[in-house]
């Protein structure tokens, strides 16, 4: 398997993006799978590498990346050394990043016999699930969509609600990261961007517009994003497929860092559902 980690995608007038690719060099026309991490997430979190290798082994070109304002840097893509960037992130920046990564992938693999640049699938975890749903509803290049523990409504996330008056006055509010103990800033621009793009950022509308297969995977022990959000997505799009994984939390019982060779049964089950769905 050919694995290329931390490729720097430089963009004009925009922050660069770090990208990993995984694919086999003995199989032609492997469909592309682009993975979007969630809020306070990054491409190297937990066992995302294990997922990438497993899906690549099944015959796909797996691409994962860090959103440009996720708080990581080119030198340190893990955790959040750049809190200023984190504070300046918003949903439309993430949609722009994803669009650019898809263009990057098509250009990179255009002359590559092993990869089919015209067959693109999206996987999104948590907030990345919401981003993926919106992108898939807008972009005809996307052939299949999978969401893992996805949110169904950006308007009710903690990043969008709360004491708006105080937030506007201060220009910033802070969220503590339970693992790193960092005080992570959210600048008020996040809310302004959400309000300015509220129609586009409506996940319910996007889900109802979807014309492609959508697999919804959720754990029944998820305390971060309630399982009801998965049922809402399924209700809005009755053609979607839903898989509830028993005993799985928001990250399918994986932790960061993940140093074991094997993953949890719950995460393994999620990977199997994803591969079967795309095949």
Image (cartoon, grey):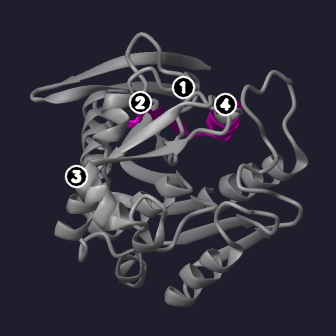
Q: How far is the residue under mark 1 from the one under mark 4?
A: 22 Å
State if disc 3 and disc 1 touch (CB < 8 Å): no
Q: Which residue is located at x 49 percent, y 56 percent?
A: 127
Q: Which residue is located at x 40 percent, y 85 percent?
A: 208
The answer to which of 181 and 125 lies nearer the viewer is 181
Q: How far is the residue under mark 4 from the one under mark 3?
A: 37 Å
Q: Is residue 261 left or right of residue 55?
A: right
> Which label lies toward us, 4 or 3?
3
The quadrant of the image that shows the N terminus is top right
Q: How far is the residue under mark 2 from the one under mark 1?
A: 7 Å
Looking at marks 2 and 3 on the same chain, the residue that comes earlier in the sequence is marked by: 2
> Which label lies toward us, 1 or 4?
1
Report which residue position mark 2 lands on: 71
Looking at marks 1 and 3 on the same chain, the residue that comes earlier in the sequence is marked by: 1
Instruction: Tell me which corner region of the image, top left, top right, bottom left or bottom right, holds residue 226.
Output: bottom right
User: Mark 1, residues whose alpha carbon is within 10 Å: few (<14), some, or many (≥20)?
Assistant: some
Q: Which secondary structure, mark 1?
A: loop
Looking at marks 2 and 4 on the same chain, the residue that comes earlier in the sequence is marked by: 4
Residue 67: in magenta span: yes
State if disc 4 and disc 1 touch (CB < 8 Å): no
Report which residue position mark 3 lands on: 189
State if disc 3 and disc 4 touch (CB < 8 Å): no
Q: Which residue is located at x 52 percent, y 48 percent?
A: 38
User: Mark 3, residues whose alpha carbon is within 10 Å: few (<14), some, or many (≥20)?
Assistant: some
Q: Which secondary structure, mark 4?
A: helix
Where is residue 196? Give x, y as percent: 16, 67
Magenta residues span 49-70
Looking at marks 2 and 1 on the same chain, the residue that comes earlier in the sequence is marked by: 2
Looking at marks 1 and 4 on the same chain, the residue that comes earlier in the sequence is marked by: 4
Report which residue position mark 1 lands on: 79
């Amino acid at each position: 398997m050919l694995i290329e980690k931390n490729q720097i995608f430089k963009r004009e007038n925009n922050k660069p993006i770090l990208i990993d690719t995984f694919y086999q060099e003995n199989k032609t026309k492997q469909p592309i799978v682009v993975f979007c991490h969630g809020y306070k997430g990054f491409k190297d979190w937990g066992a995302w590498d294990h997922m990438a290798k497993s899906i690549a082994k099944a015959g796909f070109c797996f691409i994962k990346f860090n959103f440009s304002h996720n708080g990581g840097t080119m030198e340190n893509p893990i955790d959040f050394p750049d809190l200023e960037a984190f504070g300046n992130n918003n949903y439309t920046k993430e949609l722009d990043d994803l669009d650019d990564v898809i263009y990057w992938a098509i250009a990179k693999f255009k002359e590559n016999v092993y990869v089919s640049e015209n067959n693109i699938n999206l996987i999104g975890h948590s907030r990345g699930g919401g981003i993926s749903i919106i992108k898939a509803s807008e972009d005809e290049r996307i052939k299949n969509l999978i969401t893992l523990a996805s949110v169904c409504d950006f308007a009710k996330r903690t990043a969008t609600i709360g004491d708006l008056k105080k937030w506007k006055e201060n220009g910033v509010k802070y969220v503590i990261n339970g693992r790193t103990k960092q005080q992570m800033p959210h600048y008020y621009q996040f809310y302004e961007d959400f309000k300015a793009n509220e129609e586009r950022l409506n996940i319910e509308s996007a889900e109802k517009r979807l014309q492609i297969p959508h697999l919804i995977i959720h754990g029944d022990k998820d305390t971060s994003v309630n399982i009801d959000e998965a049922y809402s997505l399924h209700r809005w799009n009755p053609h979607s497929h839903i898989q509830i994984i028993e005993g799985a939390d928001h990250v399918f019982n994986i932790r960061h860092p993940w140093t074991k060779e094997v993953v949890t049964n719950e995460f393994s089950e999620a990977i199997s559902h994803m591969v079967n769905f795309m095949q």
